[in-house]
Image (cartoon, rainbow, N blue to C red):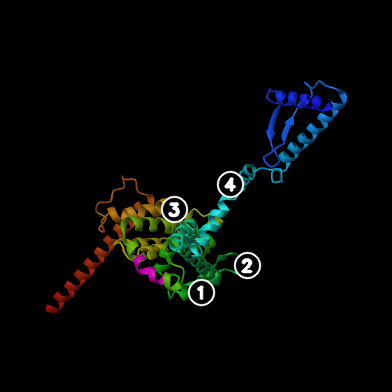
Amino acid sequence: MEDEQLQQIFQRLRTQSHRPGGRERTDSSSGWWHVDVYPTSVETVSGTRRTALKLDTLNMGQCVTKCKNPSSTLGSKNGDRESNKSNKRSSGHKEEYTSAVGKAAGDILVNGTNKGQDAAVEASHLQGPAGDAKKKEPGMGAEVSSLQRIEDLFRRYKDEREDVILEEGMERFCNDLCVDPTEFKVLVLAWKFQAATMCKFTRKEFFEGCKAINADSLDGICSRFPSLLHEAKQEDKFKDLYRFTFQFGLDSEEGQRSLHREIAIALWKLVFTQNKPLILDQWLDFLIENPSGIKGISRDTWNMFLNFTQVIGPDLSNYSEDEAWPSLFDTFVEWEMERRRKDEETKCIRSSGTDSMDADEQT
């Protein structure tokens, strides 16, 4: 009787397992039916019911165990396969790299054939970025070495207390370059270094200047002098050099706006070393002989004098006071014309005196 009741209960459970409220599955290893039943449809004798519920609870516990531990003995082969796929996906990059390295070493044989050569090609593609970086290293290293040589050169002449090359260091620098500090070459070098003050190179000026002339040693700087002197002969370059020279001669720390007369005279002689205007000597004589009337040379006067040498001829015949020349130029032209007139009178007197002496001798 009890067996019949149990069979009826299991029959009901199987029927309910096909409804939306339940499910059944079979264990391929044991052939038992594992039934998960929600306790809403069980109707039978209480004792038998408790037995059935205990069996189902055990089966439900096995299902929970499988979900929590897919790799346990309850897990199927399909479950293991999915787990392996997940692990493969998570370590995909690592396997590719390991495979490439292994193939590059020639350790992998496929169907008895060594695939090391093909694998080496694949590995070279993987290592491409690193190879490119190594190719760039020599250029970068050369640039670093050049900067280091400039740094060493700067430290050789810089002041002990300040991070600049001052008068004493400039003198030693020029001596090592085999040039005189008052030479035109030094002015051109200061121009390329864009030095703000005479007898002084800041760290930035020195570094930028060396890079501008592409030199990082004394020999390198010396080898650039011929090309720098040739560059200074070009009209546009010389104009830039000429304007730079005025600023170079100012004492920026004192806030000067005009050059002292003596400094201006020295700089005019220096800047016109390669292309001396015909009127330069007369202009400098005028400045020297009129010290009381000339306190300083303004920027406008300095810049306009270059135009003056290019426009006005050496005889000053085409000079006009009506044009917008600095007043100092008017004074100079008057002074120079007066000096020439006196020179002519003197020549005439000497000439007439010589003629009189010759006439007396003949008499």
SS of the residue under disc 4: helix
Closer to the chain start, of discs 1 and 3, is 1
Closest to the observer, 4 or 244: 4
For residue 286, side relative to residue 147 (left or right): left
- Measured Cα–Cα span from mark 1 to mark 3: 32 Å
Q: Main secondary structure of the magenta part?
A: helix
Residue 74 in the magenta stretch? The answer is no
Q: Is residue 181 above or below residue 81?
A: below
SS under mark 1: helix
How many residues crowd mark 2 within 10 Å: few (<14), some (14–19), many (20+)? few
Q: Residue at x 48, y 65 (%)?
A: 106
Q: Secondary structure at mark 2?
A: loop
Left or right, 99 with reference to 353: right
> In the rendered structure, are the residues bearing label 4 and label 2 in contact, judged by CB atoms less than 8 Å apart?
no
Q: CA distance from mark 4 to mark 2?
A: 64 Å
353 lies left or right of 77: left
The disc at residue 298 is 3
Question: In whole angstroms, how far apart are the C-alphas of marks 2 and 1?
Answer: 17 Å
Q: Which label number is shown at residue 161?
A: 2
Q: Is residue 150 visible?
A: yes
Question: Residue 166 location in percent, x, y?
Answer: 55, 67
The part of the chain drawn in magenta is: 221-227
> For mark 1, does the 10 Å Cα neighbourhood hold few (<14), some (14 to 19), or many (20 or more) residues?
some
- Asked which secondary structure carries label 3, the reply is strand
Amino acid bearing label 2:
Arg
Q: In terms of sequence position, does the residue under pointer 2 or pointer 1 come before the other?
A: 2
Query: Residue 89 bears which disc, if any?
Result: 4
Could you tell me the amino acid type at mark 4? Arg
